[in-house]
Amino acid sequence: MADYFGCLANKLPFIYLGVKVGANMGRINSWIEVVQKVSNKLSKWESKTVSMRGLWLNIIKSIHGSNRSFDQPIMSHFHVSVWSMVLKAVDNLKAKGVDLMEFCKKIIGNGFNSIWHDKWLGDVCFKVKLNKLFNIELHKEVSVAHKLQDVDIVSFFRRCPRGGIKDFQLQDLPQLLSSVVLSSFCDRWSWTLKIRMVFFL
């Protein structure tokens, strides 16, 4: 192909715009040069206003997806990532009747995880337990922490509940949240399945 267009053939990896292309980006060593070049390019003023964490957060999200959930769809470019293999293994087990998510729950720390989608208080997620409120919620991805900060719980509902099951669920929501105490630690996953070993003598 290169000969046909009169171009020089090259081998991977090669340098393009000062960055190595074609290296195995699953290895930490492959990123060292990229990090060094970005750091060198930032001026003193820029380095004070630009968050390196936010720089890397966007890169990781573009590779692995943004919601960090086991139930997110596997995108086509995931085939080279370790996370894609984890998701595929989870999907394969689910197809065989074993849903690992039934045995996982979130332990709330700083409350950055979703109040509706994650199973973090009890055995059922809020979008199922309080389904009528979830249907009228405008910000369905709102975190636990943000919901706790709301002075008026109904402020982000599409309309104020008027009678019926919505009223009962609206009474339940403050009671459920009143027991929640946030901490400085990050939310984390907890494995709830306990395996009992039986020995026969």
Image (tube, rainbow, N blue to C red):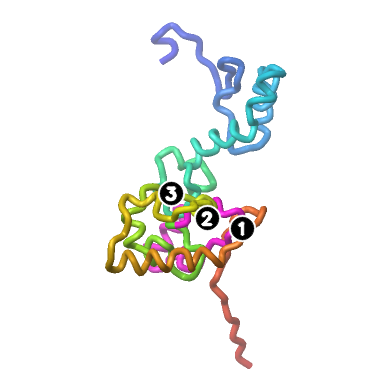
Find numbered disc 3 in the image and state the secondary structure of the residue it sits on: loop
Q: Quadrant of residue 132?
A: bottom left
- Circles 2 and 1: CB distance less than 8 Å? yes
Q: Nearer the viewer, residue 30 or 34?
A: 34
Q: Nearer the viewer, mark 2 or mark 1?
A: 2
Inter-mark Cα distance, 3 to 1: 18 Å
**Residue 106 lies within the magenta run:** yes
The magenta segment: 87-115
Query: Where is residue 104 drawn, in percent x and y?
Result: 51, 65
Q: Nearer the viewer, mark 3 or mark 1?
A: 1
Inter-mark Cα distance, 3 to 2: 14 Å
User: Which disc, if any, is residue 182?
Assistant: 1
Which badge, 2 or 1, comes first in the chain's sequence? 2
Label 1 Cα crowd, 10 Å radius (few <14 / some 14-19 / many 20+) = some
Query: Where is residue 169 drawn, in percent x and y?
Result: 37, 66
* Residue behind mark 2: 148
Q: Quadrant of the N terminus?
A: top left
Q: Residue at x 60, y 82 (%)?
A: 197
Which badge, 3 or 1, comes first in the chain's sequence? 3
